[in-house]
Image: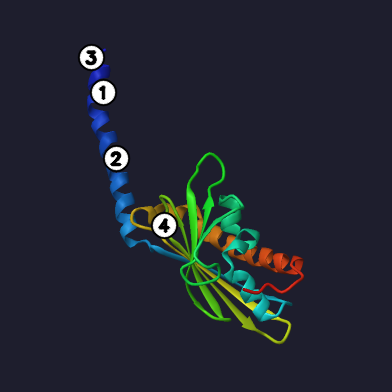
Amino acid sequence: MPALMHLFEHFIPLYLLLLLAVILLFLLTGLFIRKEWTASEVLVIDIPVLRVYQYVRQLRNHYSFNQWISLNCRDIPELKGPDGQAGAEAIFEGKGSSNNKTVIAISNLVEGFWIDFEIRSQGSAVEKIRIVTQSVNDIHTQISLLYSFRSRYPFNVFTAVSGHNHTMNRNARQSLVRLNKALKNTKEPVMT
């Protein structure tokens, strides 16, 4: 029995040092890994640019196409401010057991061309979205969607190893596919 105690006295400090070294390596790695993550997708659809722009600027429409919102939030937002204008906010209740609120806000826009949104969730970083609508011809619109996400140190290490960037790319693509479908299911022009 004393030999067993002697064995533990020598190996426990070694395991603690090894654990401390792994934690230190993790923290040091976070200093050198990027903190800004982006994903972008482009899709050309056969709907006129004005109709596309008017639809995407309305926050009440985001549940129908924004993949991130539809996966994480309930479908009926509380709107604050004039929908479709800079400063407008849509507040969504979280799905499941977490009653976290998610806010999507219009931070900036250039009429008929692009709209900047911010998605803010409790306990999470701010995700930014820019949607650009460009006319290809009278009936075709090119929609560009850019997601941007800033992860704080040391959480950027988790972001790097979790595949969050891949998820952002998939969500951007799915959002544009859903937008095309939602616009095709909305027969009348959507005007503000």
From this view, report whether residue 159 is shown above or below residue 187: above
Give the distance between the C-alpha atoms of the residues marked 1 and 4, in whole angstroms.
46 Å
* Marks 2 and 3, the one that precedes in the sequence: 3
Q: Gap in Å between the C-alphas at discs 3 and 1?
A: 9 Å
Task: Name the residue at 65% across, 74% down.
Answer: 191
Q: Secondary structure at mark 3?
A: helix
Q: What number is the disc on residue 34?
A: none
For label 1, the SS is helix
Image coordinates of residue 181 in percent, x first then y, are 72, 65
Q: Which residue sits furthest top? A: 1
Reading the image, the residue beneath label 3 is: 2
Amino acid at circle 2: Leu
C-alpha separation, residue under disc 3 versus residue under disc 4? 53 Å
Q: Earlier in the sequence, mark 1 or mark 2?
A: 1
**Residue 87 horizontal side relative to residue 96, left or right:** left
User: Residue 151 appears at what percent x and percent y?
Assistant: 40, 59
Work out whether residue 189 or residue 63 is closer to the camera in this orientation and state it: 189
For the residues labelled 4 and 2, the Cα–Cα distance comes to: 32 Å
The correct choice, above or below, for 17 with respect to 37 in the image is above
Which residue is under mark 4? Answer: 125
Give residue 103's position: percent from left, percent from top.
48, 57
Q: Which residue is mark 2?
A: 18
Report helix, strand or loop for mark 4: loop
